Image (cartoon, helix red, strand yellow):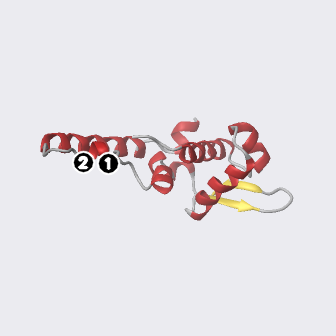
Amino acid sequence: MQINISTGYALQIMLYLAKNRRTVSSLELTKNIAVSQRYLFEVAGKLRNGGFIETKIGKGGGYTLNKEPSMISLYDVILLMEGGVHMPDSVAAPVYDNSRLVDALRFLTDYIEAYFRSFTLDKLTN
């Protein structure tokens, strides 16, 4: 499993907002998570469309969480950004039939998903 860079930034944005519990400007976010403003807008747009954050425009504007940190897990953000936890096709579809390998990979995928579900933003910011 590999998390893409957009998901990494989405997780950082969400953690920063959860920790600060206020409206955070795009400038503050770009400085603190080391992301370009263009890329921030792209990732934040996905988070907004997914219902995780709210965007306020104008003076005093920025980003705020749309849900309580205790209601958002790492898996929720990964699901939005990546569509879930997946094994690469080359690993998940063995060339020859080996049901034990396939079962082991399914178990691993389920375990990783449950592990990410167990971490909510509030647990990671305290």
Q: Position of residue 91 (x, y in %)?
A: 28, 42
Near-viewer residue (126 or 87): 87
Q: Quadrant of residue 55?
A: bottom right
**In this view, 17 is above or below 126:** below
Are dots 2 and 1 in contact, CB under 8 Å? yes
Q: Is residue 50 left or right of residue 83?
A: right
Say left or right for 103 vs 126.
left
Please give the count of numbered marks on the rendered protein.
2
- The kind of residue tagged 2 is Ala
Residue 89, label in figure: 1
Name the quadrant of the N terminus: top left
Q: Residue at x 57, y 62 (%)?
A: 51
Is 84 positioned to the left or the right of 64 in the image? left
Farthest residue, direction top: 126
Which residue corresponds to mark 2? 93
- Residue 79, compared with residue 3, is above or below; it is below
How far is disc 2 from disc 1 in space, using C-alphas? 6 Å
Task: Check the image and name the residue furthest to the right.
Answer: 59
The residue depicted at 64 percent of the width and 41 percent of the height is 19
Q: What type is the residue that disc 1 sits on?
A: Asp
Residue, x 15% and y 44% (percent of image)? 96
The image position of residue 43, as x and y in percent, is: 62, 53
